[in-house]
Amino acid sequence: MSKSTPTDAELEVLNVLWAKGPSTVREINEMLSHEKEVGYTTTLKIMQIMTAKGLLERDESSRTHVYKPLMKESDTQRTMMDKLLNSAFGGSASKLVMQALGNNKTTKAELDEIRKFLDDQLENKKGDRE
Amino acid sequence: MSKSTPTDAELEVLNVLWAKGPSTVREINEMLSHEKEVGYTTTLKIMQIMTAKGLLERDESSRTHVYKPLMKESDTQRTMMDKLLNSAFGGSASKLVMQALGNNKTTKAELDEIRKFLDDQLENKKGDRE
DNA sequence: CTGTGTGTACGAATAATTTCGTAGTTCAAA
DNA sequence: TTTGAACTACGAAATTATTCGTACACACAG
């Protein structure tokens, strides 16, 4: 069973929900409006569809419904990563990582953080097969 | 001017072209057939559209046209990476990298390779601002 | 010459996504 | 109580992507 990735419009909604926590359609639409023009009913429809798909859950106890995501941000990130990994990088995580860090303007702080993370990974690898 | 990312079907075609070099529709379709069922004219149409979009170039000098990609694999990878980075990781390359390496079964060899790469990156960072 | 195999062109059906108008409900202020 | 603002529901248009059937061109074997 492989997970499905949210569409672009859905991801925009999820990003707001992950950042702000459970929100109403109006709140989401308000945030999205900062980035681009988008009608209220457009956002509403997207969120209704997401609820039907099982991406969101909504609390209907008050007249103004409150939505919250059903998937963790990190799980969604992983799913999307895996898709990119397999569709564009032939499954090679190292190629992907180097592409991500390559000509990008990653800060030294970030690079240090990654190296620390990498050392941990290598540490955990000791005693493993392969 | 921001670059456009190929669709899923287009990416499948590009993957074959990058691996095999300039090819005919039949050759591409043959390769794609190994993975999934796909009609010849479907592949043809996709490649015609890609040519119209400027993703492919074709040599019509022989009756059987020969197609080749107009974008480098690495450029396309970067473009797709950037899109994922901005749409799902808030632009944080380190989050993305750690997600990629996290619970994934990356081999020790790969991790070593990445660390080497990382050290180079840090080396080049010396004397830079930030 | 004629049929068969291999090609391309093109239109159209289908599907998925995104966008938004309209209708109807509810609540509360005037 | 009437009115208007804020909501939800729903249908449908617009867009993009995917898939494939059909038509027609060309080459070459028989």
Image: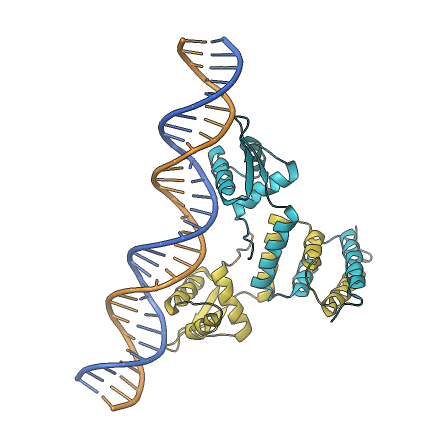
Chain colours: A cyan, B yellow, C blue, D orange
Question: Can see residue A105?
Answer: no
Give the left or right position of residue C19, taking residue A91 as reference. left
Q: Quadrant of residue A126?
A: bottom right
State the residue in front, B130 or D1: D1
Relative image position of residue A97 (x, y in whole percent)? 68, 61
Residue B115 visible in rendering:
yes
Q: Position of residue B50 (x, y in %)?
A: 45, 62
Q: Where on the picture, by quarter, is residue C2?
A: bottom left
Query: Residue B29 location in percent, x, y?
Result: 44, 71
Q: How many marks?
A: 0
Residue at (80% x, 68% y) in the render: A127
Please provide percent x and percent y for residue A86: 58, 63
A105 and A52: which is toward the camera: A52
Q: Residue at x 82, y 58 (%)?
A: B126
State the residue at coordinates (42%, 72%).
B25
Q: Nearer the viewer, residue B92 or D6?
A: D6
Horizontal arrangement in the rendering, residue B45 relative to residue B18 (left or right): left
Question: Relative to B90, is D29 above or below?
Answer: below
Q: Nearer the viewer, residue C6 or A103?
A: C6
